[in-house]
């Protein structure tokens, strides 16, 4: 049995991956030519798999993606194959949830206004504030990130509405659980809408002018999932005319966000440059997932994070 890694990982990470590999040979390919030399008889793969490399695989049974959001990783021949596909779901949940709650707290306490006042050296105490115990937070998407976000929002004594496309039990921290078919009703009730859905064919343009019109004029939209989930032009217009109160945005349909884009200059918009998943332990978690799944693969046990290759999120 052979497990191919490409591009190569550092030696300390390689040692961790090999620790549970048993009799499985681990090849740490430092070049494309080396990867091509081993892909024909590789049983498992981790790293940057391309359609060209996949076409040379003769016995591949498992691919471990190096990312959680796999929309740019899955290609048609892989999706149509019988190869088991796993992703990095779960390793970012806490840090991205922290990022989402930071937006919420900043808006609730008027920091978006005070940020501008500080830059202008203006002493003004009149930024609007929200009492969080009076607020309703809608968390759209209850995967690992959404559940972690809901738990944090509940600690702040908000009422938490959860929206999920899959049939699931109500997670901890969620007061009411709704299906995606009830999204319209949830949007009308929420003071903060936090988007935690994966990028799938169904979630592209999930939020457009229609959905923004359903939200309260006093509500805030927070997007820490994927930029394509929100129609950027529709959101920009809604913010310009005051259809919603503001937005916290880490992701955009166009990245980097162009310097000339009007969102940059809006006081009621907090922008971060797609950094919600950053954290000091993320790389360690990556390698832990690879090592654990390789140990499972070598022992013939079920793999973690098996992903639906056509719908781009966890199969279970």
Image: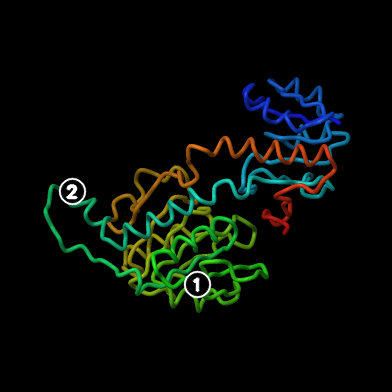
Give the CA distance from mark 1 to mark 2: 35 Å
Residue of label 1: 161
In the shown orientation, is residue 88 left or right of residue 212?
right
**Which coloring applies here?**
rainbow
Crowd class of label 1 (few under 14; some 14 to 19; many from 20; radius 10 Å): many
Answer with mark 1 or mark 2, whichever residue precedes in sequence.
2
Instruction: Name the residue: 69% across, 37% down.
Output: 290
Of the pair 146 and 243, the residue shown nearer to us: 146
Instruction: Name the residue: 59% across, 39% down.
Output: 285
In the rendered image, the quadrant that contains the C terminus is bottom right
In the image, is residue 31 above or below residue 182?
above
Residues under numbered marks 1 and 2 in contact, where contact means CB atoms less than 8 Å apart? no
In the shown orientation, is residue 98 left or right of residue 59?
left
Instruction: Name the residue: 62% across, 23% down.
Output: 10
The total of numbered circles placed on residues is 2
Quarter assignment of residue 141? bottom right
SS state under label 2: helix
In the image, is residue 164 above or below residue 96?
below
Q: Nearer the viewer, mark 1 or mark 2?
A: 1
In the image, is residue 298 above or below residue 276?
above
In the shown orientation, is residue 277 left or right of residue 130?
right
Residue of label 2: 118
Residue 259, horizontal then vertical, whole percent: 35, 43
Residue 291, horizontal then vertical, whole percent: 70, 36
Instruction: Name the residue: 68% across, 25% down.
Output: 15
SS state under label 1: strand
Residue 16, horizontal then vertical, whole percent: 67, 29
In the image, is residue 197 above or below residue 90?
below
Which disc is residue 310 wearing? none
């Amino acid at each position: 049995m052979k497990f191919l890694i490409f591009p190569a990982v550092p030696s300390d990470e390689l040692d961790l991956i090999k620790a549970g590999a048993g009799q499985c040979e681990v090849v740490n390919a430092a070049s494309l030519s080396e990867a091509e030399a081993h892909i024909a008889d590789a049983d498992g793969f981790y790293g940057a798999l391309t359609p060209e490399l996949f076409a040379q695989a003769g016995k591949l049974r498992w691919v471990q993606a190096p990312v959680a959001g796999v929309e740019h990783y899955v290609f048609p021949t892989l999706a149509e194959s019988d190869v088991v596909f796993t992703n990095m779901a779960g390793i970012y949940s806490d840090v991205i949830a922290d990022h989402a709650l930071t937006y919420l707290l900043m808006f609730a306490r008027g920091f978006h206004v005070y940020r501008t006042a500080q830059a202008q050296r203006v002493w003004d105490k009149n930024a609007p504030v929200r009492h969080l115990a009076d607020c309703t937070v809608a968390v759209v998407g209850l995967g690992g990130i959404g559940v972690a976000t809901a738990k944090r929002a509940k600690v702040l004594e908000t009422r938490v509405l959860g929206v999920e496309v899959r049939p699931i039990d109500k997670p901890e921290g969620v007061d009411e659980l709704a299906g995606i078919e009830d999204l319209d009703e949830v949007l009308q009730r929420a003071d903060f809408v936090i988007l935690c859905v994966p990028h799938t064919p169904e979630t592209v343009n999930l939020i457009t002018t229609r959905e923004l019109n359903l939200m309260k004029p006093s509500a805030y939209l927070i997007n820490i999932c994927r930029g394509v989930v929100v129609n950027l032009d529709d959101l920009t217009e809604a913010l310009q005319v005051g259809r919603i109160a503001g937005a916290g945005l880490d992701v955009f349909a166009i990245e980097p966000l162009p310097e000339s884009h009007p969102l940059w200059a809006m006081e009621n918009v907090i922008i971060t440059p797609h950094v919600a998943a950053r954290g000091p332990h993320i790389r360690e978690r990556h390698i832990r997932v690879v090592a654990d799944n390789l140990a499972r693969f070598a022992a013939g046990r079920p793999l973690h994070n098996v992903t639906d290759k056509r719908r781009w999120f966890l199969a279970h």
